[in-house]
Amino acid sequence: MVLSAKVKKYDNPGDMHGIYKRPKQKKKFRYKLKGPSVILLILLGMIFYSFGGQMVKMYNVQREITNIQEQMDELKVKNDALKKQLEQLNSDAYIEREAREKLGLVKPGEKIILEAKPGEEGSRIPAAAKNPKEIEVH
């Protein structure tokens, strides 16, 4: 004896007595804008736009302030260096040294001792010491 079973073919898998069910499709939610909500959205957009513009302006001003403060700090350092240089230039020792080196000036009673090297331009006698009695050559 042979037992046979009839197999029922289903066109739709959902017909199989709850074994397989299709997931339910979600309904699409559509929101229609009406008068008050449109006005509210426009007002919110204007508020965000105005605040955004103000924030950009504030950021630019802050950046400009920072740049100017950096420039001020650099100029203060430069100003301090120039003040020190001015004090040095106005000192008596500096003026005397420059007069001796560049102009060849001597104090009364001093003797100029020059190192003579033949053929070099630096071996010339300074213009201020043209009196041969004041010059000693070694």
Image (cartoon, rainbow, N blue to C red):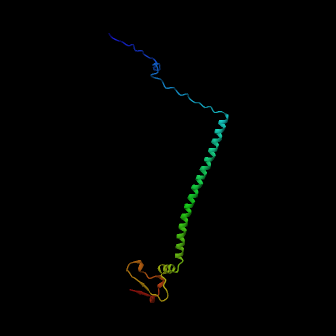
71 in relation to 52, above or below: below
Q: Which of 58 and 123 is in front in this view?
A: 58
Q: Which of 104 and 3 is in front in this view?
A: 3
Q: Which residue: 42% across, 87% down?
A: 136
79 in relation to 125, above or below: above
Which of the image's four quarters has the N terminus? top left
Q: Where is residue 85 in the image (x, y as percent from the top left)?
A: 52, 73
Q: Which residue is outermost to the left?
A: 1
Q: Which residue: 67% across, 34% down?
A: 35
Q: Where is residue 133 in the image (x, y as percent from the top left)?
A: 45, 90
Can you tell which quarter of the image residue 6 is in? top left
Can you tell which quarter of the image residue 137 is in? bottom left
Q: Where is residue 22 in the image (x, y as percent from the top left)?
A: 48, 24
Q: Where is residue 79 in the image (x, y as percent from the top left)?
A: 55, 68
111 in relation to 83, above or below: below
Is 112 situated left or right of 70 in this image? left
Q: Which residue: 66% across, 38% down?
A: 39
Q: Which of 98 and 129 is in front in this view?
A: 98
Is 108 situated left or right of 56 in this image? left
Is 103 situated left or right of 52 in this image? left
Q: Which residue: 62% across, 44% down?
A: 49
Q: Which residue is outermost to the front?
A: 1
118 in relation to 54, above or below: below
Which of the image's four quarters has the C terminus? bottom left
